[in-house]
Structure formats: structure tokens, C-alpha cells
Amino acid sequence: MTELELKKTAVKVRRGIIEGVYGAQAGHPGGSLSAADILTYLYFAEMKNLDPKDPKKKDRDRFVLSKGHAAPGLYAALANRGYFPVEDLKTLRHLGSYLQGHPNMNEVPGVDMSTGSLGQGISAAVGMAVAGKMDNASYRVYTMTGDGELQEGQLWEAAMFAGAHELDNLCVIVDNNNYQIDGAISEVCSPYPIDKKFEAFNFHVINIDGHDFSQMEKAFNEARETKGKPTAIIAKTTKGKDISYMEGQAGWHGKAPNKEQYDIAMQDLDKVEQAIG
């Protein structure tokens, strides 16, 4: 997929996020929007052997959304990739819907691990990477954490294990939008410098703009070529990306737009789409 196609797809993913959270009148738009470009790149360019008709294909690359509250972003990427109908995004969090507030691997096609309790997803991804090594398998494992999630001790236990066992089939992506539910991460409980911490756990570390597809391509290629170490990609992103009133606002971590705000959000995405051409 070309960079232009990726940009257009990312707009579709963001539309799906807004549709889902608005339809639910609940959910987490801010961190889903910040992660949308990375999720788009993973599912439409980076991850290998994906087959929406065979979601459990043995040699597929795996993805674990450790920041499970960003489920609207993951669902929107999966729907646009063909795992289930895009129209179903409107049922997010509804009674009886398979698209609940956090990913459920037993209900949602394409979800590789049920997540939600912060810090645990990366541990599951590390386990998958160990299994891949034991089986001499070709698949790679990707996991995305939030930067507020870096305050969880379990995350660093997993990182220590991954580095010590030289899991070079593992790629950790940190969605560094600088905000968690209570405000700026630097003010709540700063995890900075994030890159130096991962380096201390024997990770190969790459810093990128998490909204720049050319930087993503270079970083993920570099991660794939790195041997003897897991890779951490620290992606600097914008909370609420592309929605005018959500950008950089901690208050939109876990709040749904009303009808007027929904209309403005869709107009904002129209403008982004027009600018892409």
C-alpha cells in the first residue's frame, strides 16, 4: 500500500473510531486517534500473512493491544482490513455486541489477545514471542503500550525478560501522546526518558513521529533487521489527532462526543481527506 493509500485508510480508521464512540456514548477516543496511524501501518503494510478469512492462521504476525482501552482504534483497523463489517463499529459497547469496551479474543475476529488491565498485554506478547522462538516459527509479535501504561511495574518485568532472552522477534510500540486520564504523564508520574529505560533493558530503540508513514516504514524495517535484541519504537503522537477540539486534551481520554461534537469531528476528517487529495 502506498503512503497516499495509507493516509486515506487512516482517515477511514479515525471515522470508525468516532462512529463507534459516538454510537456507544462511551469509550476512549483520544488514545485511539493518536494510535490510528500506527494501527493503519501495522495492519495494511507491516504485518505479514494476515488473512481476514482465517484470523487464526498459524504463521500470521501477532498484535497485542496492551493499551486495551484503545479498542475503538483496533476495531476500526480490523473492520477496514476486512475482519468484520465496518457497519458493526456503530454497535461498540452496546448490549449484546461482540465489540465491547476492551478487546476479547474469543469474540472479535482478528484480536490475538484479550486486554484491558494495563501492563498485562506486553507480558502476553512476550510469551507469544518466546513461543515463536521455541517453535522456530517465522512470525513476529507486535504490541502497543500507552505512555501512561509505562507506570505499571509488570510492563518493566516483561521488558526485562524480553531483553534478557534476546527476543528479536518482538517489537514494542509506545504510543507517546504525553497524556493519560489524569493529565500530562510528565506531571502525573513521569516515565521519561522512555528511550533510555528501554535501552537499559537491552532493547534496540527507535524514536519516530507516530504520524509519519515514511518514518514508520524505516523504523519497522530496522526492527525486522535487528538481531539479538527486541525493538522498542517510541512513537511521538498527538492525543485526539485530527479532531480539532480533542487534540492535546486529556479530557478526551475517555469521553464520547455529543451530536454537535460528532458533526464537527466528521467535518474535521472531511478536511483532512480533502487535504490528502
Image (cartoon, rainbow, N blue to C red):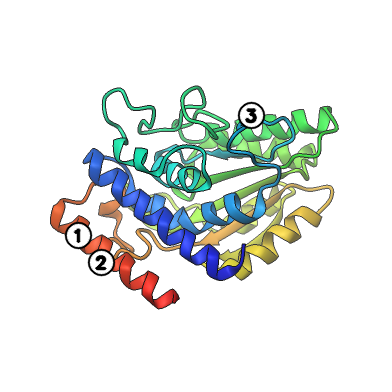
Crowding at dot 1, Cα within 10 Å, few <14 / some 14-19 / many 20+, comes out as: few
Q: Circle 2 — which element?
A: helix
Q: Position of residue 198 (x, y in %)?
A: 65, 51
Seen from the viewer's position, the closer of residues 248 and 46 is 46
Q: How far across and down, in percent of the image, does residue 237 sit?
A: 46, 62
Q: Residue at x 48, y 50 (%)?
A: 147
The amino acid marked with disc number 2 is Gln
Give the residue at x 72% y 42%. Answer: 140
Give the position of the N terminus as an image quadrant: bottom right
Identified by mark 1, the residue type is Asp
- Distance in Å between CA atoms under marks 2 and 3: 37 Å
Which of disc 3 and disc 2 is earlier in sequence?
A: 3
Element type where label 1 sits in the image: helix
Left or right of 93 in this view: 174: right
- Asked whether disc 2 touches disc 1, contact meaning CB atoms under 8 Å apart, the reply is yes
User: Residue 56's mark?
Assistant: 3
Kind of residue indicated by mark 3: Lys
Can residue 271 be seen at all in this image of the molecule? Answer: yes
Earlier-in-chain disc, 1 versus 3: 3
- Residue 157 is left or right of residue 105, and the answer is right
Q: Which residue is mark 2?
A: 267
CA gap, disc 1 and disc 3: 37 Å
Q: Nearer the viewer, residue 188 or 204?
A: 204
Mark 1 highlights which residue?
A: 263
Residue 138 x, y percent position in the rendering: 80, 39
